[in-house]
Amino acid sequence: MRVQVRVTVCLAAACAVCFAVSASAHHSHGQYEEAFSDISGVVKEVHLLTPHSWVYIEVKDASGTPRLWALEGTNRAQLEKIGITRNYLKVGDTIKARCHPLRDKNSGCLLGFLKANDGSVKDWDGGNVPAPSDF
C-alpha cells in the first residue's frame, strides 16, 4: 500500500512539473524581436479570443505589394477591461500598430499599442500602459 501511495504522489508531481513547463513555454515571447516597429494597414479580420486575440491587417511593403500581417494581442477579457469590444475595430479601418516583429521576418508581430480609426490608442499587450507620446 505504501509503495502505491508513493508511486501516485510521484506521478502527480511529475504531471504537475510537465504542465508548468508547458505553460511557461506557451507564454514565451522568444519568437519576437525585442525592439518595437511601427506598421500601418487596413483591418481584414479581428478575432477577440482567449488565450490570444488576433488582428489581421493588409500592409503594403516597400514595393507597394500588399501583405497580410497577423498581430497577436492579449486575451479578450483583458481587452474588454480597457474598452476593446468587437465594435472597436471594423474591417476596412486603417490602423497603426507598434509591435515586436517576428524574428524570422515573416509578416506578424506581438502587439504593444494599436491606434484605432477613431484616434484612440490602447495597450493590446494587457498591461494597460499609457500610450507613448511619439506614437
Image (spheres, rainbow, N blue to C red):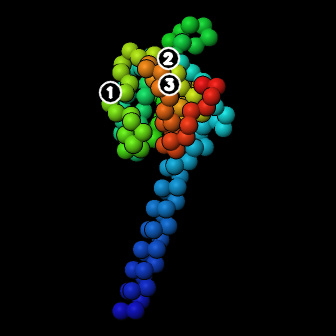
Mark 3: secondary structure? strand
> What quarter of the picture does the N terminus occupy?
bottom left
Q: CA distance from mark 1 to mark 3?
A: 14 Å
Work out whether mark 2 precedes mark 1 in sequence or the reverse, and give the earlier one.
2
Packing grade of label 3 (10 A; few <14, some 14-19, many >=20) is: some
Q: Is residue 74 left or right of residue 45?
A: right
Res 3 quadrant in image: bottom left
Quick one: which residue is furthest to the left in this view?
Answer: 87
At 39% from the left edge and 80% from the top edge, which residue is drawn? Answer: 8
Work out whether mark 1 precedes mark 3 in sequence or the reverse, and give the earlier one.
1
Quick one: which residue is furthest to the right in this view?
Answer: 35
Please tell me which residue lies in front, 14 or 95. 95
At 38% from the left edge and 24% from the top edge, which residue is drawn? Answer: 89
Packing grade of label 1 (10 A; few <14, some 14-19, many >=20) is: few
Q: Residue 129, image x and y in percent? A: 55, 40
Is 38 above or below relative to 111? above
Is 135 above or below relative to 3? above
Res 92 quadrant in image: top left
Q: CA distance from mark 2 to mark 1?
A: 18 Å
Residue linked to disc 2: 41
Res 6 quadrant in image: bottom left
Q: Nearer the viewer, mark 2 or mark 3?
A: 3
Disc 3 marks a residue whose amino acid type is: Lys
Residue linked to disc 1: 87
The answer to whether residue 98 is visible is yes
Disc 2 marks a residue whose amino acid type is: Gly
Work out whether mark 2 precedes mark 3 in sequence or the reverse, and give the earlier one.
2
Please tell me which residue lies in front, 13 or 37. 37
The answer to whether residue 67 is visible is no
Quick one: which residue is furthest to the top in this view?
Answer: 64
At 35% from the left edge and 21% from the top edge, which residue is drawn? Answer: 90
Mark 2: secondary structure? strand
